[in-house]
Amino acid sequence: MKYNVSRRGFLQGSLALGSTLFLPKLSLAKSANGKLQHACIGVGGMGFSDLQSILAGGTTDIIALCDVDAGNLAKAAEWLKTEHKIESVRQYRDWRELLEKEGDKIDSVNVSTPDHMHAPISYSAIQKGKHVYCQKPLTHTVNEARILTRAARKAGVVTQMGIQCHADIAYRMAVAILQSGGIGKVTQFHSWQSGSAVWTTAKARPEGEDPVPANLDWNKWIGVAPMRPFKADIYHQAKWRGWQDFGSGVMGDFACHIFDPVFTALKLGAPLSVKTEISDYNTETYPVWQIVQYEFPGTEFSAGKTVKGTWYNGEKIPPRELVPMPAEYKLPGAGSIIVGEEGVMVLPHWAGPQLYPLEKFKGYQRPKIKSLDHYQQWVDACLGKGKPEANFDFSGPMTETVLLGNVGIHFAGKTLQWDPVNLKIPNMPEAEKYLKKTYREGWSIPGIG
């Protein structure tokens, strides 16, 4: 049985699942100076970049910082002091303590931690009525994505997922071209990221343990995940991305970015089915390469009753023959091929769309697109101005779709039929255990894990 659910129907059904749909008035910032009162949770790596970007517009006050690594905290605090003359920012090692002590002083948080902590922190902040900016992928499991999306809608808070390219002119131009029928109705799409880097550096959990550095609180770094011994240069800082307990692999990191313009343009809903092929399998890390085949219900922008999409990562990329381009042309290292009835678009990751055949689109007038600031759009919305485009109503369902590709790793070569309304896999119920997880004892959070 196929569950043909439109994007609108999927959103309505998913938000209603397990709770009554409730749309309160948005909680708006209450600061006396008119600025957003904000706390940063996770300030190393991408978290430090998020801190800089959220502050850049001049309409945010940074009230508190939190990180399990004292070194990250010191770097962020020194930057605030040196670059912005901010010396009074309060520092925490435990996000729970921050939310408890700063709850009446802040309006919002950003969550820029390893993937496994996105949902518990974001959900807890939402339950306290805080606006949330969360890095991608929105959550670590499909079930968490559904719960977080529903919780944000019910609380009426402003949300945004960290897919910065959603506001990029190149991506938005591609969306405009596709929705205006520039290449006709879409028949299929192929998206990929050909690199592997930190996602495939290990295959087995290392034996033994190393002394935990004095600056790192390992228990809090592990958080909701099962405890394991600390090993230097294996998990912290960025190498957690390739471990199933903490990260989401290449697909979780990049499909949220690269699928984004295709999902936006075609207004895709939940997939009907998912089939994953992999290079190798183990229960600790992600495969060297992955190919995930999706079938979606058709939309007003697709050519038939269904539209097929395929994801590739690692050494796998789409067939070049899909694109009628000159022999000397090469596909980019990451991006999408969107095949239409009247032409083909190649959309490199972070670059402008290319239309083929070249002779057919010579002189094609591209739409004029205004620039947007991904971060400031969220800050402005927290202050009551507008609505973020990468909010959880959009990014939650897309994250579910992406993470289903990782569920398929455990059932390589088999098609999983997806019931998005009930979060079920009817033809393979044994796969449903990978849709959710149990939080570690002492870290459970009622309502999500």
Image (cartoon, grey):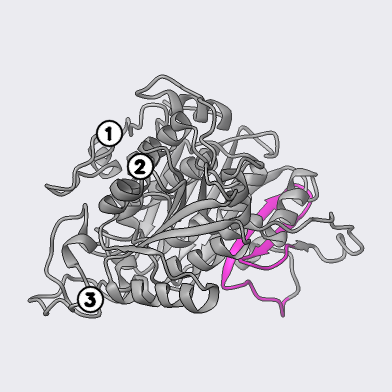
- In space, the residues marked 3 and 2 are separated at their CA atoms by 27 Å
Q: Is residue 147 magenta?
A: no
Task: Give the class, few, some or many, for how many residues have Cα within 10 Å of label 1's Cα (few <14, many ≥20).
Answer: few
Kind of residue sitting beneath label 3: Asn
Looking at the image, is 278 positioned above or below residue 233?
Answer: above
Q: Which residue is mark 3?
A: 215
- Give x and y (percent) for residue 106: 43, 48
Question: Closer to the observer: label 3 or label 2?
Answer: 3
- In space, the residues marked 3 and 1 are separated at their CA atoms by 32 Å
Looking at the image, is 128 positioned above or below residue 191?
Answer: above
- Give x and y (percent) for residue 138: 42, 50
Q: Which residue is mark 2?
A: 123
- Give x and y (percent) for residue 407: 32, 48
Q: Is residue 161 visible?
A: yes
Q: Quadrant of residue 45?
A: bottom left
Q: Is residue 417 visible?
A: no
Between residue 329 and residue 191, name the one nearer to us. 191
Q: Residue at x 19, y 68 (%)?
A: 217
Between residue 430 and residue 96, name the one nearer to us. 96
